[in-house]
Image: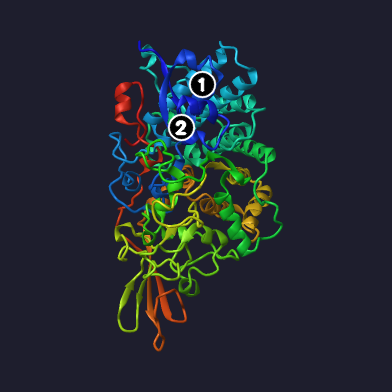
């Protein structure tokens, strides 16, 4: 057999230093190989080996142009041909003709699970006699990361192959899938071990600690308590109802209420163990303050109390860091503005919001937005709730200074996603449209762009728009929402409303008055808005059995047409209702043929994996 070797993160000289610099260790590239026996006899190399497991997190939705929200009703990927339509058009298949996000990928996560197993084995033996405090921390992190990787797989596939020790050549075949219950129980076991072992570990938003493990346990238990896995709720899903191995994709015994109780307890444990950000309002924050509150959460990154765990970056210039999966220059979270920003800023409009998402946002007084209301339709961007203005770039909304070559088209630094007719008949195509004068192929198809996770303080245009944006994997607010959801499902509406109001007041919204099914609906849409582009909606739409509601409809754009008023004078266009009459019209666009198929609730296991091990049973519908 080949000599067992382990890839170690970064140059070894740097590896001895970066263990104390938690903002840097995730931004390194494996460059060396060290014999396995040497790794686990040296404390610094052992720590470096465990830290290498974090490379398997990548940076979630902030690593690339395609976010997982583009697989749902909330967003659309602008550039065709990269496999997103595997989800949105129900075309996923075992041949792998769809986008396989690294951080949820069967073939890409199992090597990290193998490394976690190796770390657990070696650290448990501790033949080198390393100090107990270090061993406990590293062992706790290894258990956490294994639980995390299995969580990512479980949320996509259901029950998966559980490997709990380093595989040998003799043991790499005949490893059938565990049941869903066995998979969940193993994840919870790993997280509980991590919670115990990390009791004394220092708080670190870039590394796992007790707080991180508590938060992840809340996520897992909330996910598995949901209707997708409950036989009394999922029987109407055709592929699930006809599947010959239901034990692989859901519960076959036990009480859903007991599972919601477990989710409630786990979520409250985290809420009690630490604190969130500005959740002490007793009435709604002002609009201005609420807008700032939401921006603070992601612009302040790990310095904000809401940030529990994620990938951290520092201020950096072009070429100073690369990320796994990149091509030598991709900068992960530092690239968000470039990936998703407007073409009129020389950015790429990778994933853009749909009108379906924008319409989820209420007015500031809590009134629901309705296109059928003439007053709403006449001024759709006025007086919306605070998160609207922190999340979207929309026609007439202010943004960064234009670059020198674009100033002649827009002297006022306002988004132009409409079409403006002057009194002499001249039509101005907005500079941020697909018919505009700047890189029109990168224009939004929907009339909107994402502002969230784009730093308004950094200049526009590559390479100057590299930015410091820490990518959150899990936030305090997500766990708060988990707690609310568990209480709603347990009929404890008073407690649910108390905590939901904490969030709504921070965001400037009035107190909740709904109950019953209306409360559950309000909660779901609150969660959708709060966790935009945080890898939440894809899994929420599945676990809530909202696939048809999300994807069985076409993408809508907002068509904006303005006509100059008679007797007015316009020199340089800007949004001005005293000079122009504006008409806003949501319109279906023919881009993706969005259709929901029930088999999309679970991912197909790639045929190449089944070919390696025929004992693996395929998921339903494939």
Which residue is rendered at x = 60% and y = 53% of the image?
A: 516
Q: Viewer-proximal residue, 260 or 252?
A: 260
Query: Residue 587, image x and y in percent?
Result: 36, 65
Q: Is residue 180 above or below residue 391?
A: above
Q: Earlier in the sequence, mark 1 or mark 2?
A: 1
- Residue under the image location 37 percent in, 60 percent down: 446
Q: Residues within 10 Å of mark 1 (few under 14, many from 20)?
A: many
Could you tell me which secondary element the residue under label 2 belongs to?
helix
Q: Which mark is residue 127?
A: none
Q: Position of residue 268 (x, y in %)?
A: 66, 39
Q: Is residue 571 above or below residue 47?
A: below
Percent coordinates x, y for residue 426 in the rendering: 30, 79
Which of the numbered marks, if any, corresponds to residue 55? Answer: 2
| Mark 1, residue position | 45
Return the x and y of residue 609 as percentages of the image width and height.
Answer: 33, 26
Question: Is residue 448 shown above or below 471?
Answer: below
Q: Residue at x 70, y 52 (%)?
A: 280
Front residue of 297/176: it is 297
């Amino acid at each position: 057999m080949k000599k067992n070797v382990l890839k170690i993160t970064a140059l070894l000289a740097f590896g001895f230093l970066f263990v104390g610099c938690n903002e840097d260790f995730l931004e390194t590239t494996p460059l060396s190989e060290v014999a396995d026996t040497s790794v686990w006899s040296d404390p610094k190399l052992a720590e470096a080996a465990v830290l290498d497991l974090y490379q398997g997190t990548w940076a979630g939705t902030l690593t690339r142009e395609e976010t997982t929200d583009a697989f749902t009703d909330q967003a659309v990927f602008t550039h065709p041909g990269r496999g997103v339509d595997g989800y949105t058009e129900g075309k996923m298949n075992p041949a792998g003709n769809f986008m396989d996000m690294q951080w949820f990928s069967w073939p890409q996560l199992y090597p990290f699970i193998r490394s976690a197993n190796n770390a657990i084995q070696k650290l448990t033996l501790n033949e080198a006699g390393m100090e107990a405090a270090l061993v406990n921390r590293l062992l706790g992190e290894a258990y956490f990361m294994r639980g995390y990787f299995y969580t990512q797989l479980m949320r996509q596939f259901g029950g998966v192959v559980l490997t709990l020790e380093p595989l040998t050549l003799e043991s790499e075949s005949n490893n059938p899938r565990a049941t869903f219950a066995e998979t969940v129980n193993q994840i919870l076991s790993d997280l509980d071990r991590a919670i115990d072992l990390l009791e004394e570990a220092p708080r670190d938003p870039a590394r796992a600690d007790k707080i991180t493990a508590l938060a992840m346990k809340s996520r897992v238990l909330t996910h598995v308590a949901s209707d997708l896995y409950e036989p009394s709720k999922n029987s109407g899903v055709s592929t699930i109802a006809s599947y010959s191995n239901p034990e692989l994709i859901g519960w076959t015994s036990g009480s859903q209420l007991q599972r919601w109780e477990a989710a409630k307890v786990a979520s409250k444990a985290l809420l009690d163990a630490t604190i969130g950000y500005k959740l002490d309002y007793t009435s709604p924050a002002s609009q201005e303050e609420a807008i700032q509150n939401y921006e603070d959460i992601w612009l302040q990154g790990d310095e904000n109390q809401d940030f529990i765990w994620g990938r951290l970056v520092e201020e950096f210039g072009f070429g100073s860091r690369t990320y796994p999966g990149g091509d030598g220059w991709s900068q992960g979270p530092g690239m968000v503005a470039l990936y998703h920003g407007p073409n009129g800023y020389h950015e790429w409009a990778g994933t853009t919001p749909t009108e379906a998402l924008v319409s989820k946002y209420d007015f500031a007084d809590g009134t629901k937005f309705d296109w059928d209301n003439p007053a709403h339709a006449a001024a759709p961007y006025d007086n919306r709730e605070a998160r609207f203005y922190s999340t979207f770039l929309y026609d007439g909304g202010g943004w960064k200074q234009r670059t020198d070559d674009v100033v002649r088209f827009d002297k006022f630094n306002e988004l132009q996603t409409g079409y403006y007719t002057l009194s002499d008949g001249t039509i101005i195509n907005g500079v941020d449209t697909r018919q505009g004068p700047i890189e029109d192929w990168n224009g939004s198809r929907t009339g909107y762009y994402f502002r969230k996770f784009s730093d308004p303080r950094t200049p526009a245009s590559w390479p100057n728009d590299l930015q410091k944006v820490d990518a959150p994997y899990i936030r305090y607010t997500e766990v708060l929402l988990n707690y609310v959801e568990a209480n709603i499902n347990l009929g404890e509406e008073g407690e649910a409303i108390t905590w939901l109001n904490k969030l709504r007041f921070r965001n400037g919204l009035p107190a909740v008055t709904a109950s019953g099914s209306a409360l559950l609906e309000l909660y779901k849409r609150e969660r959708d808005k709060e966790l935009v582009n945080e890898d939440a909606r894809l899994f929420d739409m599945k676990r809530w059995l909202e696939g048809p509601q999300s994807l069985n409809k076409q993408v809508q754009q907002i068509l904006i047409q303005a006509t100059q008023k008679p007797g007015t004078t316009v020199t340089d266009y800007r949004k001005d209702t005293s000079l122009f009459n504006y008409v806003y019209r949501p319109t279906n666009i023919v881009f993706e043929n969005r259709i929901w198929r029930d088999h999309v609730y679970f991912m197909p296991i790639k045929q190449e994996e089944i070919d390696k091990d025929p004992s693996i049973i395929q998921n339903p519908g494939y």
